[in-house]
Image: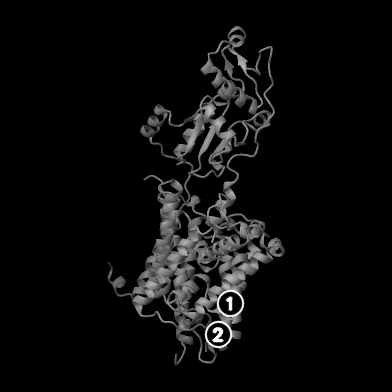
């Protein structure tokens, strides 16, 4: 400690310290940039255990139950979203995902057409510290295949029939209709909406359309004010 | 050096814990308010008669301390500053609200936080002041439909000084430090000049 | 205590709040939560229909008393009491100047509280929430607010000096 410093009063020492810290702070850039750190091992583990997936049928159940504890995010373009989207989804295209202001503890379910974009988005969000991001397994393709246009075997046993009834009603809830396994096997492998002759058009969104998770933001706001 | 704070927003603990922390942080808050003598209306209003500028000193020292803290912690990447809640700016109501609050301060002798501190140390006027706040807030709520327009005038965006004036964050930080230190020096001079006699 | 040291202590408490919970200090919100709870207990429909009060009622129906600020203010009370007792400054008394009666002083205190409530409501906070917290975060509205508080107080101080001298 230089001699002159120790001869100052406490107040003056504090002032000197403040000025020094302030001067150094001139060069500060306190906001986090866009660079992120990835824990490769941790992520590989999660991916391996598929802890990050949500099945299409699971999601269908959540929507029917009107659960509001998660946010369903459609990562495609606005045009694609408007043509058809899973009921209760909000449209946040990939390129604006990081600026969307999503809460880091919010449960987020991401989906895209097939799942590639959802997987990439999941990776980005996780790298930025979002702990509760999940992907819809198989994306919209799987959604159509499993939920909206489920396939039923033609000669089903009694147990299967009960399960089939449930899937039938779920499909109806979302405005879809079942396909018979034989027809699928015989006809094209393509899902309805692509090339098959008896193509039911993707149903207009009739099920609950209020975006999931909208109830939350206003409540949160008040709690953080003064 | 991973980003991990604010801890609550990174999911390190949940809402229940944050309420416990609220209580503990409040204890620290109340403790230092009273330590500074702010449980006393006379001490507080002395600021506005220029005898004792402790209000200015304490307030701005606290601001500078916390400000330097978040600046440095954000800079080294330990704190995600963008996740710290910034109260939205509604300039006109805030300006008018500030004036009213200032008047309430010298009329009543406290501000909400210090009135609680005063009540905790036995000040009856502090308690009455608290009752006044309840009455006033209730009145405000009842009158809200008529006040709503003015209340909501403004952008409601979260705005910062650096952002608004197009200055680098660090420059504003340094400017605030300079202003505070200069202010403390000036406060010392004013106190000597206007020291109350015979109190 | 040396005001600068008390200020540093306060600043560190504020910093702890930022780092731990991502928000600053406050006081006014706690009063609002209590009012929201009281009104919703006595007249729930009225509470829901009043936009201002409804804002303090959580959407999931849980009690408005489960508010961060309310817990913080209770802590404030405890911490202040502890400090006051420690310093021997705790005393049941009415702070006032020599020339004014207790009754008048208490009336002024009440009036001040009422004014303060309106001021804090419009400003979205008081000196704790806006000035301290917003000040440290370089919030534009907070700094404007802070300057106006000092302006308003200094402007009117002269006219109420009979209360304190």
Looking at the picture, how far across and down is residue C7, in whole percent? Answer: 42, 70
Looking at the picture, how far across and down is residue C8, in whole percent? Answer: 39, 67
What's the CA distance linking mark 2 and mark 1? 10 Å
Which quarter of the figure has residue B141? Answer: bottom right
Local packing at callout 2 (Cα closer than 10 Å; few below 14, some 14-19, many 20+) is: many
Q: Is residue A17 left or right of residue A61?
A: left
- The local secondary structure at tag 2 comes to helix
Q: Residue at x 65, y 23 (%)?
A: A176
Q: Residue at x 56, y 76 (%)?
A: B105
Question: Which one is in front, A57 or A100?
Answer: A57
Establish if A27 lies above or below C161: above
Q: Residue at x 60, y 78 (%)?
A: C111
> Which chain's residue wears label 1?
C
Does the rendering let one see residue A66?
Answer: yes
- For mark 2, what is the residue? C105
Establish if A144 lies above or below C164: above
Looking at the picture, how far across and down is residue C100, in whole percent? Answer: 55, 90
Question: Disc 2 vs disc 1: Cβ atoms closer than 8 Å?
Answer: no
- For mark 1, what is the residue? C112
If the image is split into quadrants, where does the C terminus of chain A sit?
bottom right
If the image is split into quadrants, where does the N terminus of chain A sit?
bottom left
Establish if B112 lies above or below C105: above
Looking at the picture, how far across and down is residue A158, in whole percent? Answer: 53, 16
Q: Do marks 2 and 1 share a subunit?
A: yes
């Amino acid at each position: 400690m230089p001699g002159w410093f120790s001869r100052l009063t406490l107040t003056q020492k504090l002032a000197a310290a403040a000025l020094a810290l302030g001067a150094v702070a001139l060069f500060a850039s306190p906001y986090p940039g866009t660079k992120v750190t990835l824990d490769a091992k941790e992520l590989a583990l999660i991916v391996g255990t598929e802890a990050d997936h949500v099945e299409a049928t699971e999601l269908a159940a959540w929507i029917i139950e009107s659960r509001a504890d998660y946010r369903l995010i459609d990562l495609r373009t606005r045009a694609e979203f408007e043509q058809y989207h899973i009921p209760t989804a909000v449209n946040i295209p990939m390129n604006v995902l990081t600026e969307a202001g999503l809460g880091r503890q919010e449960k987020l379910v991401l989906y895209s057409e097939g799942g590639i974009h959802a997987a990439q988005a999941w990776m980005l969000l996780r790298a930025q510290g979002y702990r509760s991001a999940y992907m819809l397994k198989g994306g919209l393709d799987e959604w159509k295949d499993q939920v909206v246009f489920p396939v039923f075997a033609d000669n089903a046993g009694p147990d299967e029939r009960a399960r089939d009834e449930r899937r039938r009603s779920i499909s109806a809830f979302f405005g879809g209709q079942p396909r018979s396994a034989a027809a699928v096997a015989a006809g094209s492998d393509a899902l309805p909406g692509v090339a098959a002759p008896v193509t039911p058009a993707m149903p207009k969104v009739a099920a609950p359309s209020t975006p999931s998770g909208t109830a939350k933001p206003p409540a949160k706001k008040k709690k953080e004010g003064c | 050096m991973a980003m991990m704070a604010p801890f609550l927003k990174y999911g390190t603990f949940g809402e229940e814990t944050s309420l416990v922390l609220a209580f503990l942080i409040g204890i620290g808050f109340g403790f230092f308010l009273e330590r500074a003598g702010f449980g006393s209306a006379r001490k507080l209003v002395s600021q506005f008669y220029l005898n004792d500028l402790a209000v200015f000193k304490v307030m701005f020292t606290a601001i500078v301390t916390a400000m330097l803290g978040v600046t440095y912690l954000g800079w080294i990447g330990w704190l995600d500053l963008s996740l710290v809640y910034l109260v939205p700016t509604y300039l006109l109501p805030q300006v008018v609200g500030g004036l009213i609050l200032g008047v309430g301060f010298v009329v009543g002798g406290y501000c909400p936080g210090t009135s609680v501190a005063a009540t905790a140390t036995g000040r009856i006027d502090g308690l009455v002041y608290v009752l006044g706040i309840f009455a006033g807030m209730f009145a405000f709520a009842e009158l809200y439909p008529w006040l709503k327009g003015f209340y909501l005038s403004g952008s409601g965006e979260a705005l910062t000084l650096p952002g608004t004036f197009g200055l680098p964050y660090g420059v504003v930080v340094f400017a605030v430090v300079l202003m505070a230190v200069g202010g403390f020096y000036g406060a010392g001079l004013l106190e000597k000049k206007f020291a109350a006699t015979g109190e | 205590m040396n005001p600068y040291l008390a200020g540093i202590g306060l600043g560190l408490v504020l910093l702890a709040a930022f780092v731990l919970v991502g928000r600053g200090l406050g006081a006014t919100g706690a009063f609002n939560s209590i009012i929201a709870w009281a009104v919703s207990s006595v007249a729930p429909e009225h509470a829901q229909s009043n936009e201002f009060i409804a804002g303090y009622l959580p959407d999931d129906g849980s009690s408005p008393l489960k508010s961060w600020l309310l817990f913080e203010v209770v802590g404030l009370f405890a911490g202040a009491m502890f400090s006051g007792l420690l310093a021997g400054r705790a005393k049941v008394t009415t702070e006032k100047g020599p020339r004014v009666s207790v009754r008048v002083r208490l009336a002024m205190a009440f009036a001040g509280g009422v004014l303060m409530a309106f001021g804090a409501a419009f400003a979205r906070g008081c000196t704790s929430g806006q000035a301290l917290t917003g000040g440290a975060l370089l919030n534009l509205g907070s700094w404007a607010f802070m300057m106006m508080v000092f302006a308003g107080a200094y402007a009117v101080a002269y006219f109420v000096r009979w209360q304190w001298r």
